[in-house]
Image (cartoon, coloured by chain):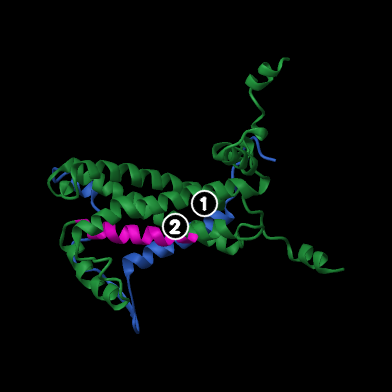
């Protein structure tokens, strides 16, 4: 091979320079395709308690889809249209299921100490996504444009003022609350959910807690 | 919706009225929310105890 041919030949990915190549190498090293999209799971995953994570994710997709339809026509659509009322109800009940599945998922992971085995960040992203979901649900209540939303706004403003954030996060400001509900908070929750799932893929599903006899044997010298 | 269909789709509990609340000192909880929490706890216990169907592709 001549010198010119050698120069034109495609180099190995490991030898490629630049930030895109570095990011690609890191991504493939941390999350190889068989880890990112596995076709098998460990035997201990065959339990109903492991189903609630994906149920939460499925409900989240319905929340995003129904919310997108509501965003097309605006927050007052559901007051005057049967179709709007249907999508508003779909949005509400998918959120109810999302929160319920997420809390049962949280209970399951708490009692199996799912932060074991370098999974602390997985646990933290899940916990922060849960808090973000509460904020998203709260701003959703404020976007209903009815007496309920007015009542919640007036009651909550005192609490927000008491902790000193009322000037930046004003529950009485409908436009601001709507933007938080449909742009900022869904983006935060969505990004955290993606990171959470990627970390679960990277470290694998947490194994069950060891039996007491196994723990005792491990502790003995 | 006609009057004949409405009873079939009506809620099992009459929702047209003020809610019922339980009070323990400063803690106030609606019966509706308590029922939801109880159902979630039941689902959690069932998920732990109910055997999972055997599938393929598990190691």
Instruction: Identify the secondary structure beneath mark 2.
Output: helix
Q: Residues within 10 Å of mark 2 (few under 14, many from 20)?
A: many
* Quadrant position of the C terminus of chain A in the picture: bottom right
Our reading of the magenta stretch's main secondary structure is helix
Numbered label attached to residue A129: 2
The magenta-colored residue range is A127-144
Q: Position of residue A167 (x, y in %)?
A: 25, 70
| Element under disc 1 | helix
| A177 vs A190: above or below | below
In reply to whether residue B8 is colored magenta, the answer given is no
Q: Which residue is mark 1?
A: A196
Relative to B4, residue A157 above or below = below
Name the residue located 24 percent from the left edge and 66 percent from the top edge.
A170
Report x, y in % for residue A51.
Answer: 53, 48
Q: Position of residue A104 (x, y in %)?
A: 48, 58
Chain letter, green: A
The answer to whether residue A145 is left or right of residue A129 is: left
Both on one chain, marks 1 and 2?
yes
Q: Viewer-proximal residue, A202 or A80? A: A202
């Amino acid at each position: 091979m001549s010198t010119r041919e050698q120069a034109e030949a495609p180099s190995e990915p490991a030898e490629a320079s630049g930030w895109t190549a570095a990011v690609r190498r890191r991504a493939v090293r941390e999350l190889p395709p068989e880890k990112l999209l596995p076709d098998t799971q460990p035997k201990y995953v065959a339990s109903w308690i492991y189903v609630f994570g994906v149920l939460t994710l499925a409900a989240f997709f319905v929340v995003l889809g129904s919310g997108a339809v509501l965003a097309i026509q605006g927050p007052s659509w559901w007051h005057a249209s049967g179709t709007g009322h249907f999508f508003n109800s779909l949005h509400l009940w998918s959120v109810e299921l999302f929160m319920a599945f997420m809390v049962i998922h949280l209970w399951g992971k708490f009692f199996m100490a799912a932060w074991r085995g370098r999974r602390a960040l997985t646990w933290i992203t899940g916990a922060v996504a849960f808090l973000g979901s509460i904020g998203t649900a709260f701003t959703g209540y404020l976007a209903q444009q009815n007496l309920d939303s007015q009542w919640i706004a007036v009651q909550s403003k005192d609490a927000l003022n008491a902790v000193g954030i009322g000037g930046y996060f004003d529950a009485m400001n409908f436009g601001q609350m709507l933007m938080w509900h449909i742009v900022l908070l869904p983006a935060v929750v969505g990004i955290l959910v993606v990171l959470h799932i990627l970390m679960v893929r990277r470290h694998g599903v947490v194994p069950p807690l060891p039996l007491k006899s196994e723990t005792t044997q491990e502790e003995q010298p | 919706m006609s009057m004949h269909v409405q009873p079939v789709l009506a809620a099992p509990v009459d929702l047209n009225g003020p809610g019922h609340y339980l009070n323990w000192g400063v803690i106030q909880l609606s019966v509706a929310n308590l029922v939801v929490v109880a159902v979630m706890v039941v689902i959690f216990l069932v998920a732990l105890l109910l055997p999972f169907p055997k599938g393929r592709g598990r190691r």
